[in-house]
Image (cartoon, rainbow, N blue to C red):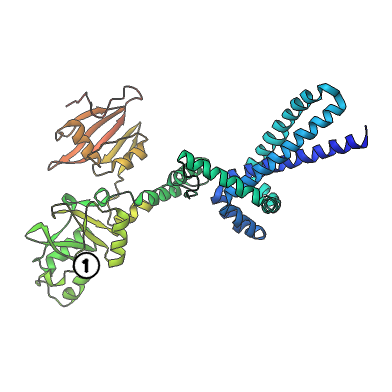
């Protein structure tokens, strides 16, 4: 073998190694993504500058790898053809194309990209300094390529230069689900993060204490009677009304009763002790209500409907529970919202939100006009059920357990089977 032929083969191997490098680097960049690159800046402070450049110029870096890879692949193809002709004569081009295609696909594409997917951090840490040098060397070519791509995009009506978020809400939610499934996040952590994400999408009407469950007192009540209300409820704040619940005049704090009680003024009216109430619409989002209550330094707000009537009330605890889950204290009812009775049977409180029920039971209870389990049962039956009355909904048998004063307080959900699912607007089989 002549020295020129040996040198050509050696140069060909160098080209293939460079192609391996570019393919590995390209896949490591795309597999990492911008979020991972920002994280790596802290993990590898010695590479912080070049990692920061890459995170802010991913498209240009990828263009550099693609341009460089194509240059070396074309050079390798030309050199391989020359070597093959020298070795095999007129059959050389066919042999060169066949052999080089197999080598590039296996050793310069599949192998480096597979390695990079599993070891993207290590590949990036080793390859970035060289990539930055290649980028500086090919910078004029890269700008020309980007200019051509931009012009073609304009002709096709595409905004290829539009800046988009490097991680969307859907991407983040998928990351949380995958992290939970893989065990990287505990179930409580996953639910808390999900609560933070959903916080700005939830309306106050979905988390408030409804008007029917509110404990309020007349503003002309005496200190002694008001103290009895606080002892009975365990609340630290109770709204006060004048004549009717739609006329809330203030909020009475338990600690404001300490002065009159210690002074023996048991017959004094609580009206002068009331604090100014905060009113919020039932359509306001929970995150907006939370900020408003924090800014006002008020822990309880009166929720009003579109007509100005009292729809319910909401506390900071109610809002926080959307993120951290139920917060139980010594005065709270210990009965869980959804009690697993075993055997596919669940005792559910009527006020439970349908979204929470769907997540707990793993079945989509979706209705357009109602938010609670009680509302769902009313919609399915079309009337107030009697205690013990049941209805079949998909694979579930839903029974009214406790009904009082035209309110469904508790229902029992029993899993029947996984077949015979019915449409929500056609819930047949209502049984007395």
Instruction: Work out whether 107 lies above or below 257.
Output: above
Q: Position of residue 201 (x, y in %)?
A: 33, 49
Q: Position of residue 40 (x, y in %)?
A: 60, 54
| Quadrant holding the N terminus | top right
> Which residue is painted at 66% across and 37% down in the image?
114
> Could you tell me how many numbered marks the image carries?
1
Image check: 408 left or right of 26? left
Local packing at callout 1 (Cα closer than 10 Å; few below 14, some 14-19, many 20+) is some
Residue 326: in sight, yes or no? no
Image check: 423 left or right of 238? right
Residue placed under numbered mark 1 in the picture: 254
Instruction: Residue at the far left: name it.
Output: 243
For this rendering, which residue is in front, 148 or 259?
A: 148
Instruction: Work out whether 35 lies above or below 392.
Output: below
Instruction: Residue at the far bottom: name it.
Output: 263
Q: Position of residue 22 (x, y in %)?
A: 69, 43
For this rendering, which residue is in front, 28 or 299?
A: 28
Secondary structure at numbered mark 1: helix
The picture quadrant where one finds residue 428 is top left
Instruction: Work out whether 409 lies above or below 210.
Output: above
> Which residue is painted at 32% across and 56% down in the image?
287
Image check: 38 left or right of 275? right
> Which residue is painted at 31% across and 64% down in the image?
294
């Amino acid at each position: 073998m002549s020295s020129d032929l040996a040198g050509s083969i050696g140069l060909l191997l160098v080209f293939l190694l460079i192609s391996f490098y570019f393919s590995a680097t390209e896949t490591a960049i795309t597999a990492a993504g911008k979020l991972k690159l920002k994280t790596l800046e802290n993990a590898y402070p010695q590479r912080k500058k070049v990692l920061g450049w890459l995170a802010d110029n991913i498209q240009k870096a990828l263009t550099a790898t693609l341009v460089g890879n194509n240059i070396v692949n074309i050079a390798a193809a030309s050199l391989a053809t020359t070597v093959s002709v020298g070795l095999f004569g007129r059959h050389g081009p066919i042999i060169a194309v066949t052999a080089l295609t197999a080598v590039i696909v296996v050793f310069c594409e599949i192998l480096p990209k597979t390695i990079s997917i599993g070891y993207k951090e290590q590949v990036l840490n080793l390859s970035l300094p060289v990539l930055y040098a290649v980028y500086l060397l090919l910078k004029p070519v890269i700008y020309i390529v980007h200019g051509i791509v931009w012009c073609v995009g304009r002709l096709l009506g595409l905004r290829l230069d539009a800046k988009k978020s490097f991680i969307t809400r859907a991407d983040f939610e998928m990351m949380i689900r995958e992290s939970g499934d893989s065990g990287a996040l505990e179930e409580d952590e996953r639910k808390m993060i999900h609560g933070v994400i959903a916080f700005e999408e939830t309306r106050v009407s979905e988390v408030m204490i409804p008007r029917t469950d509110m404990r309020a007192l007349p503003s002309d009540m005496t200190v002694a009677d008001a103290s009895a209300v606080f002892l009975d409820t365990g609340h630290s704040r109770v709204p006060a009304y004048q004549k009717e619940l739609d006329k809330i005049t203030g909020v009475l704090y338990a600690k404001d009763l300490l002065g009159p009680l210690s002074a023996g003024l048991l017959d004094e009216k609580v009206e002068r002790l009331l604090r100014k109430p905060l009113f919020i619409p039932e359509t306001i989002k929970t995150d907006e209500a939370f900020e408003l209550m924090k800014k006002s330094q008020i822990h309880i707000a009166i929720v009003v409907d579109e007509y100005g009537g009292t729809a319910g009330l909401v506390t900071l605890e109610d809002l926080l529970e959307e993120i951290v889950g139920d917060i139980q204290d010594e005065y709270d009812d210990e009965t869980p919202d959804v009690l697993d009775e075993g055997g596919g049977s669940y005792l559910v409180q009527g006020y439970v939100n349908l979204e929470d029920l769907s997540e707990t039971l793993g079945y989509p209870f979706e209705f357009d006009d109602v938010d609670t389990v009680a509302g769902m049962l009313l919609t399915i039956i079309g009337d107030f059920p009697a205690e013990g009355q049941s209805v079949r909904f998909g694979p579930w048998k839903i029974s009214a357990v406790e009904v009082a004063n035209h309110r469904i307080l508790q229902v029992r959900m029993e899993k029947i089977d996984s077949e015979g699912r019915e449409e929500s607007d056609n819930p047949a089989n209502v049984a007395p």
